[in-house]
Image: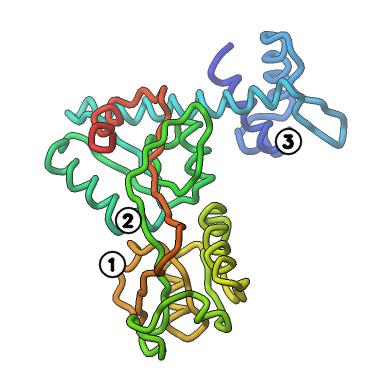
Amino acid sequence: MELRHLSYFKAVAEELNFRKAAERLFISQPGLSRQIKQLEELLEVKLFERDQKHVELTVAGNYLKGEVDFVLNHLQMTKSQLKLIASGKIGELRIGFLGSASNQVLPDLLSKLNSQQPLISTSLEELSNAVQVEMIEKDKLDLGFVRLASVPSDLEMKVVLRDSFSLVVPKDHPIQIQDFHSVNQFRDESFVLFSSDYSNLYYEQIIGICKDAGFSPRIRHKSVHALTIFKLVENGMGVAIVPTSLKEGYELNVRFMQVPNIPQFTELSAIWKAENRNPALKQVLPFII
């Protein structure tokens, strides 16, 4: 089995169409079919169910697709790391994060790296919880910052920030901080929330805060971006409940009021794959653990 077999298989597995996969690979369709048949013979399993109209992965083919993604991603990472190491660097750390990590946790980590590990470079990408978990499992990311209750057993998880919740209102809202006793005071307001795509756990916590106060929030808008939520609040589209740490880094006409007397809190956690072999990750983990 050669690397080209895996690349050809990946293209067909993603396209589920031999003609489109052949065009993508710049080879002939008969040539691609021969390569896939050869791979099936080498592995002694059937990878695709196909007829003149449809192509589907078999159970074995679906399993191989996940493994091929991992292998090819790891090879690409190895190639990039080799270039960095040859230039005198330790390597590159690929970091995924939720927007809320960019206010305090991520800048603190990058500051430590700049002063104590200058030979480590970083690439940063803002991603949802689910995408970070998937990319770390597939070796597309080395480190993530998420808001999740748990992660798959092959990943490690460490809480790096425990946070309270704050209500966000327009700056000219008549209820002032000294008058704020319960979110029930806002039961008739429209709410702007982070969508459940941002974090289902966090979304359910917000709903729980409102229900504990005796009402179900009237949700008018949802977003996965804090700035969008704050701009909507600023323009009178509703009020929001967010992690208190998000008040840092924005200059908007909104006011943050910490929600008093509630049991709910939110945690931001770092996650990584225990079997990750990136030497840069091994140097960075002591800053987190």
Where does label 1 land, which residue?
A: 249
**Helix, strand or loop at mark 1:** loop
Q: In this figure, which colouring scheme has been used for the structure? A: rainbow
In the image, residue 217 sits, relative to residue 271, either above or below, namely below
Where does label 2 land, which residue?
A: 102
**Helix, strand or loop at mark 3:** loop
Q: Which mark, residue 263?
A: none
Q: Amino acid at mark 1?
A: Gly
Q: Amino acid at mark 2?
A: Ser
Instruction: Work out whether residue 8 or residue 167 is closer to the camera in this orientation and state it.
Output: 167
Which circle's residue, 3 or 1, is located before the other in the chain?
3
Where does residue 253 sit, x and y in percent of width and height? 34, 83
In the rendered structure, the answer to whether residue 149 lies left or right of residue 253 reads right
Q: Nearer the viewer, mark 3 or mark 2?
A: 2
Where does residue 178 sit, x and y in percent of width and height? 33, 82
Which quadrant is the N terminus positioned in? top right
Residue furthest toward the left? Answer: 115
Circle 1/circle 2 CB separation < 8 Å:
yes
Q: Within 10 angstroms of label 3, few (less than 14), some, or many (20 or more) residues? A: some
User: What's the distance in space between the residues labelled 1 and 2, CA to CA?
Assistant: 9 Å
Q: Residue at x 57, y 26 (%)?
A: 7
Q: Quadrant of residue 11?
A: top right
Where does label 3 land, which residue?
A: 16
Q: Nearer the viewer, mark 3 or mark 1?
A: 1
In the rendered structure, the answer to whether residue 93 lies left or right of residue 206 reads left
Which circle's residue, 3 or 2, is located before the other in the chain?
3
